[in-house]
Amino acid sequence: MPALLFIACLTQLPGNELEPLPTALAKVVPGVRFDDVPLRRAVNRVADANGAAVMFVRGVDPTTPVSLDEADLTAAEALADVVGQGNAAAVALGGAVYVAPPAVCANALKIAAERREELGPTRGVRREPRERALAEQNVVWGDLTPPRAILDDVAAQFGLAVENADAVPHDLWPAGRLPAADAPAALAAILAPFNLTFVWSDDRTGVTIEPLADGFSPDPAPPLTAFAARLPGDGAAMGEGGGVPLDRRTFTLAVEGASVRRIMEAVNGVRFEYDPRALGGEEGGLETRVSIDVTDADADTFFTALFEPAGIAFRWEGTTVTLEPAS
């Protein structure tokens, strides 16, 4: 029987709350382990735990078994690994992780970029329809939805008339969502899997669905990690703070052999202040690998488990944790 075990993710969000995609992709999964799990289930679990939306399209076998047993991965790295095992690719399209065959990912990105460029100021074209097509919308659909129905919803949200919509073949897609998508991204996401594209009407109030031209050959899609926000590097502080005060927070984490630095990067809403020279070094300090197993621990218990094995003393106030070498 396939087994799935996530070794706690401090970034997990309640319900269906989403993060901006670059932020979600940059989050660190202190430890993740699953063995022979269906591709879609693995992708959805990693994405959901880090606040990322996912869109699966045709051409990818969602039942392909995938395995992963790693620590200190970003969400982007974990997703790229498991998607690659399914002979697929993943890119950021709109505000979602778009999972499709590599050629489809590349086509979708190029279609969206070219059609978006055509929404720039153009003589004789009113600004209002151009701005409406560039406004970000949230597209959501349920399980077993025909892509034609998703196309109709996108057209309604952006106020677009669609010509030749029958060119989209009948198919049934799994539930998905495409947040923060402008019209070029939303339409490209739906059409690229069928080797289709679209052209704007002269006034930018409608589109016509067309086959991709012979010779349409985009560059390979960039890796998913290219879409992630940069993680904090070495410095005198890490994190932004401003979250729930630490005297009202609890922490649950089970992880083996993760570096102190990586776990710190995964803690939301906390600012860590420290002297990087005092806590640096390849063998100790922030690079110390620790194993933690706590459930609903208060801040003192959690930070003791995290920092004591590394020889680091801590004190906290509000959402700021100050670190220094233990005496």
Image (cartoon, helix red, strand yellow):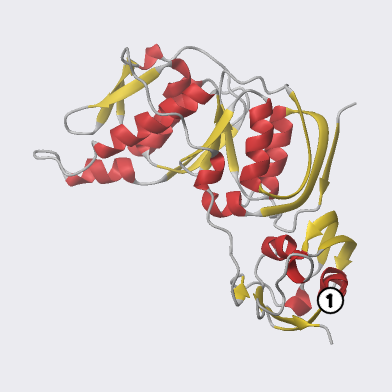
What amino acid does circle 1 point to?
Gly
- The residue nearer to you, when weighing 262 against 184, is 262
Task: Pick the quarter of the image with the N terminus.
Answer: top right
Place of residue 16 in the rendered image (x, y in percent of width and height, measured from the top left): 65, 48
Q: Is residue 95 above or below residue 232?
A: above
Tell whether 288 sits left or right of 172: right
Residue located at (60% from left, 77% from top):
236
Q: Is residue 230 above or below residue 134?
A: below
Task: Pick the quarter of the image with the C terminus.
Answer: bottom right
- The residue nearer to you, when weighing 142 against 61, is 61
Residue located at (59% from left, 37% from top):
54
Residue located at (27% from left, 46% from top):
131
Residue located at (64% from left, 72% from top):
243
Place of residue 297 in the rendered image (x, y in percent of width and height, measured from the top left): 87, 69
Place of residue 267 in the rendered image (x, y in percent of width and height, measured from the top left): 70, 64
Q: Is residue 92 above or below residue 310?
A: above
In the picture of the structure, the residue carrying the numbered disc 1 is: 311
